[in-house]
Image (spheres, rainbow, N blue to C red):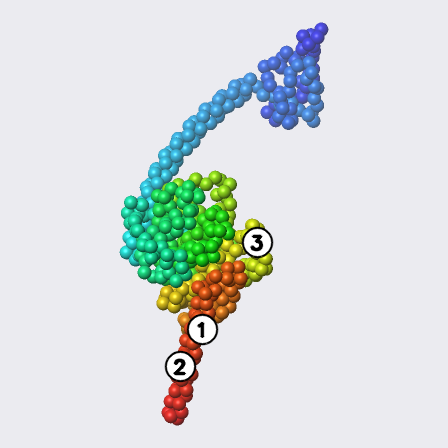
């Protein structure tokens, strides 16, 4: 009864024993306990009352107890072999890890050596810079990586000599006639420091006076020793801005924050200028042009360096300004520095022309546009100065232009005629610029500030006349040489 009695029920089954079909009849299930059966698919056949009856076409395969033991022994051996193989793998992995660790150690030594070389190169660069009086220019394809910048000043404030400005110098600083060629770097730094104090910016922004000194040092050391775009040009632009603030009585019309933005943008506007303009950067596909997608690459770079310096706690003159005010100051400075890209000259001047007749000092958009025009005026204001101060700047600019055009020729890049030493002269370089850029812009500003006509606009007109006279002399000499050459050629025949 039940499973117990049925285990003795006789069955007829068909087996494959060593490849032969055997019919086993009358077998009792209990007699099959000493063997193992598998079906055609290799599945174990359960030896119990549910065991199905098979046929010669669907054989059971018999696995004897001995074979079972053999399988067990083989399995045990296989497991032991696997364990041995795992130990082998562990040993191999351990050895390889040891080799990698050794390699990392060696590579690490190489990194140390590389860093040492970098430091040696940096020391050499600083030594060359100190001997040459400025920073060394980057190689052909400019690399503006952070490693190349000297953001923090090489010398700290204690070695920054203190100059006491005479009353005569203080008054001269407020005028466009100021002679920028008679001053050393430390003296220019002292003048800039005085401007910030005099305008009330140190008090307004709660600047630490020592931080102001450090910031100015860092600014000076991040201008390169280019013929034109150097720290003296930075001072020139900043001094002209300071002069225009006084001449146009901007303290009465703009906020102290606006004045701080104007002065700081002027100080920072050409930071780390490489001496090669945007056209070169774009045509040569330099790192800067790629980084800024050909959109005002130099001006964007000047902004970036300016705020890298301000990010240093020891140089942050706006450290005590609340975050919202600093955000506004930062955005305004960026706007002004980007406005110095001459590619935007027409756009900015046209915008100002539309506002100047009904200018509203309470209108933020109007004031922003004015500030953009003011920094543009200061940036290209050399011809406003007396001839003996202005003319050396023309030589400096042409030297920088010729350096660029020579490189463009050697690299197979387009060359602008006004930069080509074979095509340009002082008069031809200046006349068009004064007539079509400087005078129209300053005359537009004069509508808002009539007081600039005598001291700023008239000198521009005089400068235009001066260079037109020089051009007439040059043209006459050229014509004379041409006539002489033709005469000589006729005599030879």
Q: Element type at marker 1?
A: helix
Image depth: mark 3 or mark 2 in front: 3
Say which of 156 and 23 sits in front.
Answer: 156
Say whether disc 2 or disc 1 marks the residue closer to the N-terminus.
Answer: 1
Q: Residue at x 40, y 43 (%)?
A: 207
Query: In the depicted view, which residue is nearer to us: 407 or 485?
Result: 485
Closest to the camera, between mark 2 and mark 1, is 1
Tell me what residue is drawn at x 48 percent, y 61 percent: 451
- Pointer 2: what residue? 477
For label 3, the residue is: 360
Q: Residue at x 68, y 17 (%)?
A: 51
Q: Is residue 445 above or below residue 54?
A: below
Tell me the crowding category of disc 2: few under 14, some 14 to 19, or many 20 or more residues within 10 angstroms, Cα based: few
Task: Mark yes or no: residue 18 visible.
Answer: yes
Counting residues from the N terminus, which is met first, the one under dot 1 or under dot 3? Answer: 3
Check residue 375 in the rendering and tell me which mark sits there, or answer none: none
| Quadrant in which residue 182 is drawn | bottom left
Q: CA distance from mark 1 to mark 3?
A: 35 Å
């Amino acid at each position: 009864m039940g499973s117990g009695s049925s285990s003795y029920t006789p069955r007829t089954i068909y087996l494959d024993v060593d490849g032969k079909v055997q019919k086993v009849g009358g077998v009792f299930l209990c007699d099959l306990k000493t063997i193992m059966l598998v079906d055609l698919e290799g599945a174990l056949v359960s030896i119990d009352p549910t065991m199905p009856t098979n046929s010669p076409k669907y054989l059971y395969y018999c696995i004897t107890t001995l074979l079972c033991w053999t399988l067990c022994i083989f399995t045990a051996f296989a497991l032991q072999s696997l364990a041995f193989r795992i130990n082998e793998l562990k040993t191999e992995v351990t050895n390889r890890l040891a080799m990698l660790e050794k390699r990392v150690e060696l590579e690490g030594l190489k990194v140390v050596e590389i860093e040492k070389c970098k430091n040696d190169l940096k020391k050499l660069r600083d030594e060359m810079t100190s001997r040459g009086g400025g920073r060394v220019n980057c190689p052909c394809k400019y690399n503006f990586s952070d490693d190349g910048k000297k953001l923090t000043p090489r010398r700290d404030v204690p070695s920054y000599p203190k100059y006491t400005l005479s009353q005569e110098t203080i008054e001269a600083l407020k005028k466009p006639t100021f002679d920028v060629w008679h001053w050393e770097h430390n003296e220019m730094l002292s003048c800039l420091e005085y401007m910030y104090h005099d305008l009330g910016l140190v008090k307004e922004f709660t600047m630490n006076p020592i931080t102001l000194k450090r910031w100015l040092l860092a600014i000076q050391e991040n201008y390169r020793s280019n013929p034109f775009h150097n720290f003296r040009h930075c001072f020139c632009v900043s001094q002209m801005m300071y002069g225009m603030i006084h001449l146009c009585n901007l303290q009465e019309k703009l906020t102290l924050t606006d004045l701080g933005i104007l002065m700081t943008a002027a100080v920072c506007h050409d930071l780390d200028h490489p001496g090669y303009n945007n056209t070169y950067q774009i045509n040569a596909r330099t790192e800067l042009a790629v980084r800024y997608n050909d959109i005002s690459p130099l001006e964007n770079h000047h902004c970036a360096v300016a705020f890298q310096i301000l990010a240093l706690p020891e140089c942050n003159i706006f450290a005590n300004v609340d975050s919202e005010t600093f955000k506004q100051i930062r955005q305004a400075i960026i706007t002004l520095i980007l406005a110095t890209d001459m590619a935007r000259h027409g756009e900015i001047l046209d915008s100002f022309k539309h506002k100047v007749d009904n200018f509203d000092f309470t209108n933020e958009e109007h004031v922003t546009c004015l500030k953009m025009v003011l920094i543009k005026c200061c940036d290209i204001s050399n011809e406003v100065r007396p001839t003996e101060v202005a003319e050396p700047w023309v030589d400096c600019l042409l030297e920088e232009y010729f350096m660029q055009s020579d490189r463009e020729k050697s690299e197979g890049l387009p060359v602008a005629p006004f930069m080509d030493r074979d095509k340009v002269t002082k008069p031809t370089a200046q006349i068009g610029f004064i007539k079509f850029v400087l005078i129209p812009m300053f005359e537009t500003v004069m509508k808002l500030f009539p007081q600039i006509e005598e001291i700023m606009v008239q000198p521009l007109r005089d400068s235009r006349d001066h260079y037109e006279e020089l051009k007439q002399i040059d043209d006459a000499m050229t014509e004379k040489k041409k006539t002489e050459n033709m005469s000589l050629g006729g005599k030879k025949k």
